[in-house]
Image (cartoon, rainbow, N blue to C red):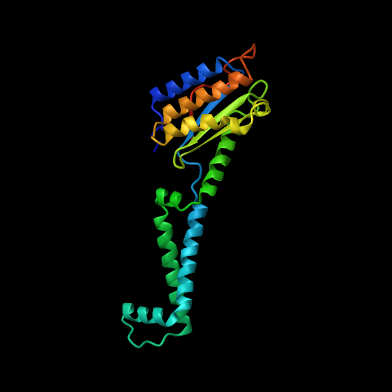
Amino acid sequence: MTARPILSPADSARIAAAVGAAEAHANGEIVTVVSRQSDSYADVALAWSALVAGLALLALNAAPAFYLALADRVLGLWGHEWTVREVLGLALAVATVKFAGMWLILLYRPARLALTPRTIRAGRVRARAAMAFHLGAQDRTDGATGVVIYLSMAERRAEIIADAAIAAKVAPEVWGDAMHAMLDHFRKDRVADGMIAGVAAVGKVLAEHMPRDSKPANELPDGPIEL
């Protein structure tokens, strides 16, 4: 089943027009990338599930009499004498149920994202943006003048990565205004407006540091890329 596009054709055309306008005044190629999510965070879900299972085993170890009596009542085993094998089997069953239950809960993406530490989310978005830059812009222009504006929808985070010639002239913190302009719109689910604002801000920086000359224009597509 084909996923529904993130951007409408009209919004894609608006972004492409903004990119063309920005590139008209600078020796830079702007590539916009919109991703639904930068990572599945399956390892985070696995870690949480293992932690919950481990905590259940610790609780069983801390108060075995209480939990064995509880198991007796639940299973109708009044006065049952538990063997070592039965206790181990109970522990395995409890850990398995706890692990599976937490895993099922974290199949719900918002819950998985909410339980993923912010630093991990930021790192995964940055890594996916770097991959998008490598595939979509790095060393693909005359003079290494590509810039990728990357948005990850699920994490509500954006990244701007510039190729070597631009990075040599523009410090990373200079992109702060562009990031701020984008995120104000993204937080209100105005994806296209955010991208257009980001493109305009990036274009302004490029025009200041790398004004247009005789360099070949439009070396990379203007339209947004969806992942």
Foreground residue, 39 or 96?
Answer: 39
Q: Residue furthest top?
A: 214
- Give the percent coordinates (x, y) of residue 39: 51, 45
Q: Is residue 77 left or right of residue 155?
A: left
As drawn, 4 above or below 72: above
Q: Report the residue at 39% width, 51% height from top.
A: 108
Q: Is residue 78 left or right of residue 207?
A: left
- Give the percent coordinates (x, y) of residue 214: 64, 11
- Give the percent coordinates (x, y) of residue 58: 49, 73
As drawn, 67 above or below 39: below
**Tag count in the figure?**
0
Foreground residue, 108 or 89?
Answer: 108
Q: Is residue 108 left or right of residue 219?
A: left
Q: Report the residue at 47% width, 31% height from top.
A: 182
Q: Report the residue at 49% width, 32% height from top.
A: 180
Quadrant in which the N terminus is drawn: top left
- Viewer can see residue 226: no
- Give the percent coordinates (x, y) of residue 21: 51, 16
Foreground residue, 186 or 64?
Answer: 186
As drawn, 57 above or below 65: above
Q: Quadrant of residue 126?
A: top right
- Viewer can see residue 115: yes
Foreground residue, 203 or 41?
Answer: 203
